[in-house]
Image (spheres, rainbow, N blue to C red):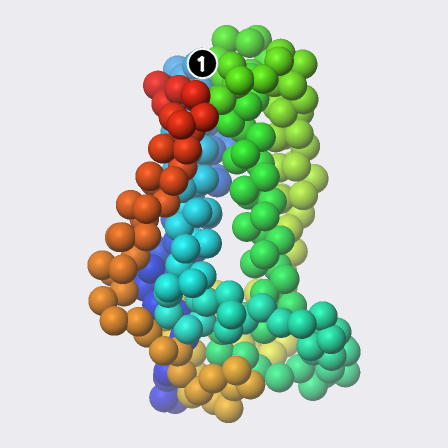
Amino acid sequence: MPYVRAWDLPTRLFHWTLLALIASAWISYEFAEQIGDETLVWHRANGLAILTLIVWRLLWGFVGSSTARFSRFLRAPRTIAAYAASLLKGRGARYLGHNPLGALMVVALLAAIAVIAGFGLFATDDNDLVGGPLYRLVEESQNTRAARLHALIFDFVLLPLIALHVAVNVGYALAKKEPLIRAMITGKKPDEPYADAREAEIVSHPILRALVCLIAAAVIVLGGILAAGGRLAL
């Protein structure tokens, strides 16, 4: 079966790197004592890396390849409802990039991760031994509240969203024979009549463009923390 380009390399690297960093952030917090990191150095480093990746993805949503651009996959509520109705009837169209419901999932995941990382900037641990880069800018009660929300949103929003995301992707692979997970690894999908585009339009010099966006994202995140009066020492 012939294949067509669906996802550029930077988008795929972002997807799997973000997954690895989230897993690492959880492990580095839950098993901090076992790995000898009581001051959560690794956890905080993961948080800064995750926040930088989220900003990178926002930038890439404007200058990346066609299937990564927000303007190409975010749909109006009416379109989303129509797609959901057709899907329930077993007639959902195939999309090269994110389908209308998948686009909602992308937005929800990015928003949840960004909010968790944002609260982490102001949070302190249970023993008040260490805090996020901006924890000194707010009162102690706000540090405690930020830490609580940081954990609650991870447990009751992000984890369910991730579980739903995985389940839907597996469901699409089994029921509709759409290799969504494989496509995010190889960057290619079977050549079929997709509703949004026949093939992805890959930007010129995607790696160089992605590196420029990554540098810009790091400057925005780290420079923003410093400009706000925070500390980057881990």
Foreground: 226 or 192? Answer: 226
From the viewer's perspective, is residue 225 above or below residue 165?
Answer: above
Q: Residue at x 77, y 83 (%)?
A: 89
Q: Tell me the amino acid under the disc marked 1.
A: Glu
Left or right: 148 in relation to 230: right
Foreground: 141 or 108? Answer: 141
Tally of numbered tags: 1
Image quarter of residue 106: bottom right
Q: Residue at x 72, y 70 (%)?
A: 77
In the rendering, at what x and y percent does residue 167 appear?
Answer: 62, 60
Query: Judging from the image, what secondary structure is the residue with disc 1 in?
Result: loop
Q: Give the crowd class for mark 1: few <14, some 14-19, many >=20 residues within 10 Å.
A: some
In the rendering, at what x and y percent does residue 41 appear?
Answer: 39, 21
Q: Name the image quarter holding the N terminus.
A: bottom left
Q: Residue at x 41, y 55 (%)?
A: 59
From the viewer's perspective, is residue 122 above or below residue 118?
Answer: above
Q: Residue at x 51, y 27 (%)?
A: 121
The residue identified by callout 1 is 38
Foreground: 158 or 221? Answer: 221
Foreground: 145 or 182? Answer: 145
In the rendering, at what x and y percent does residue 8 appear?
Answer: 35, 68
**Does residue 185 appear anywhere in the picture?**
no
Q: Name the image quarter holding the C terminus.
A: top left
From the viewer's perspective, is residue 117 above or below residue 188?
Answer: above
In the rendering, at what x and y percent does residue 119 appear?
Answer: 58, 30
**Does residue 223 appear anywhere in the picture?**
yes
From the viewer's perspective, is residue 61 above or below residue 5?
Answer: above
